[in-house]
């Protein structure tokens, strides 16, 4: 039996839940279907950073060389990649290399800035209106550096933010110690992105899932989508392991699984999974004052009330969320290289999740070039939590026929598909 629905959202992590929230506020009926439990996707175990400062895409000049250097130090490197001759994987790598350009950065900055600021504003409004209690802390994000080379990169990023009207404070060694007394003497300076914030992502997403249920969303869990069928320029059926849906509108927010789910739609969706890790520990006696990034190691540290989370690593990998203990040990060691820790961590949880990464470092947000009732909301890489509320509002605006509040062209799927936007070939 086929079930008719208004809006069917595929994926129930940060992006899917935020899309549901704003679509429900706009008066739409919403069904969410997820292959596992909602609110437990790749955003739930991440660092919990809300970063409107993150306006420079992953694909930026110098990243190819930096990545190759990192691969020479596998035990301490923040990056690794699988070896594979798969044509799609090789194509993604080639596109990433070509995208590491000044032109890509210039194109990306206005779009990431607009979406990041919208999302940060929406977090504040949502948490206040809904009464969410999720360890929200608007104290910024402090980058710590041990080498002059990395510190110079941080200063350059701060300059880029200033040029784009965003706040960032460059700090010398003494100023860093004033803001974070736990830093070790090897830390020579830092950059404080004062417009950023942090929260406990697992708690936030659980509360958001409960809220969208209260607002009337139907949530179907542990039911993977096996295929999407289209005809005459429209999605006609979405088939799961148990049911068939005939939706008026589909929102694909399945992260790293999006290409697999949409395999039959004749679209190029160049999303590569990138595995990251985190550990959550009981708060140590000496707790950092605010969210941190350990610059050279690219490891994030977040105080979460009576807990502390350490997260890091970027591994281009298959669809695999298994935890490698060696990586957990590595990110804990990174903490001890930058910050005083006079005790053994009482680890409560270890986690691995997949960041859906596009070759140019920008998410896919907007209408399908081929199906007139299919919206994409995927490919947010490490920013799935941070850009969730902004993406949700954008998707609700598009679904309602409202004009976008800023230029969405850089996020469009057309950049990877040579199909005119008005072409509707099923």
Image (tube, helix red, strand yellow):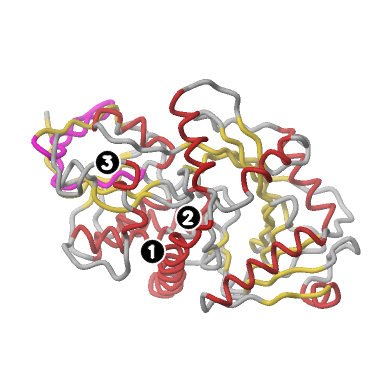
Relative to the observer, which residue lies in front, 246 or 356?
Answer: 356
Tag nearer the camera, 2 or 1: 2
Residue matched to label 1: 390
**N-terminal of the two: label 2 or label 1?**
2
Expressed as whole percent of the image width and height from the top left, the position of residue 32 reads 29, 45
Residue at 66 percent of width and 64 percent of height: 291
Residue at 46 percent of width and 31 percent of height: 91
The answer to whether any part of residue 121 appears in the image is: yes
Q: Is residue 83 above or below residue 7?
A: above
Residue matched to label 2: 104
Residue at 68 percent of width and 77 percent of height: 169
**N-terminal of the two: label 3 or label 1?**
1
Q: Is residue 238 above or below residue 363?
A: above
Query: In whole angstroms, how far apart are the C-alphas of marks 2 and 3?
Result: 18 Å
Query: In whole angstroms, how far apart are the C-alphas of marks 3 and 1?
Result: 27 Å
The answer to whether any part of residue 41 appears in the image is: no
Expressed as whole percent of the image width and height from the top left, the position of residue 171 reads 76, 75
Magenta residues, dominant SS class: strand
Expressed as whole percent of the image width and height from the top left, the position of residue 117 reads 45, 71
Tag nearer the camera, 3 or 1: 3
């Amino acid at each position: 039996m086929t079930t008719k629905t208004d809006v069917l959202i595929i994926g129930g992590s940060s992006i899917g839940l935020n899309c549901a929230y704003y679509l429900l506020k706009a008066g739409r009926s919403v069904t969410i279907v997820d292959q596992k439990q909602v609110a437990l996707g790749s955003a739930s175990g991440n660092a919990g950073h809300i970063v409107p400062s993150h306006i420079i895409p992953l694909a930026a000049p110098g990243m190819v060389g930096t990545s190759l250097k990192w691969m020479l130090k596998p035990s301490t490197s923040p990056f690794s990649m699988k070896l594979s001759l798969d044509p799609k994987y090789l194509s993604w790598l080639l596109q990433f290399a070509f995208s590491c350009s000044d032109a890509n950065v210039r194109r990306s900055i206005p779009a990431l800035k607009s979406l990041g600021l919208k999302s940060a504003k929406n977090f504040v409004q949502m948490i206040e209106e809904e009464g969410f209690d999720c360890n929200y802390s608007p104290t910024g994000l402090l980058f710590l550096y041990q080498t002059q080379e990395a510190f110079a990169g941080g200063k350059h990023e701060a300059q880029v933010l200033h040029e784009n009207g965003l706040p960032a404070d460059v700090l010398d060694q003494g100023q860093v110690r004033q803001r974070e007394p736990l830093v070790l003497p090897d830390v020579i300076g830092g950059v404080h992105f004062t417009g950023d914030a942090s929260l406990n992502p697992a708690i936030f997403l659980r509360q958001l899932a409960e809220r969208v249920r209260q607002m009337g969303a139907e949530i179907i869990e542990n039911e993977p989508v096996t295929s999407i069928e289209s005809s005459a320029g429209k999605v006609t059926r979405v088939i799961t392991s148990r049911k068939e849906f005939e939706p008026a509108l589909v929102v694909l927010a399945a992260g790293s699984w999006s290409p697999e789910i949409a395999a039959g739609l004749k679209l190029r969706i160049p999303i590569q999974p990138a595995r990251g890790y985190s550990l959550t520990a009981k708060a140590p006696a000496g707790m950092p004052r605010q969210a941190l990034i350990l610059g050279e190691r690219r490891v994030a540290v977040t105080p979460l009330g009576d807990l502390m989370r350490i997260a890091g690593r970027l591994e281009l990998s298959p669809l695999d969320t298994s935890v490698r203990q060696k990586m957990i040990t590595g990110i804990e060691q990174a903490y001890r290289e930058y910050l005083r820790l006079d005790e053994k961590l009482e680890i409560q949880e270890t986690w691995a999740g997949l960041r859906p990464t596009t070759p140019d470092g920008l998410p896919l947000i907007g209408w399908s070039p081929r199906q007139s009732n299919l919206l994409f909301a995927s490919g947010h890489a490490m920013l799935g939590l941070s850009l969730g509320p902004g993406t949700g509002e954008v998707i609700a605006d598009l679904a309602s026929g409202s004009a976008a509040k800023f230029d969405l062209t850089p996020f469009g799927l057309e950049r990877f598909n040579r199909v005119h936007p008005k072409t509707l070939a099923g």
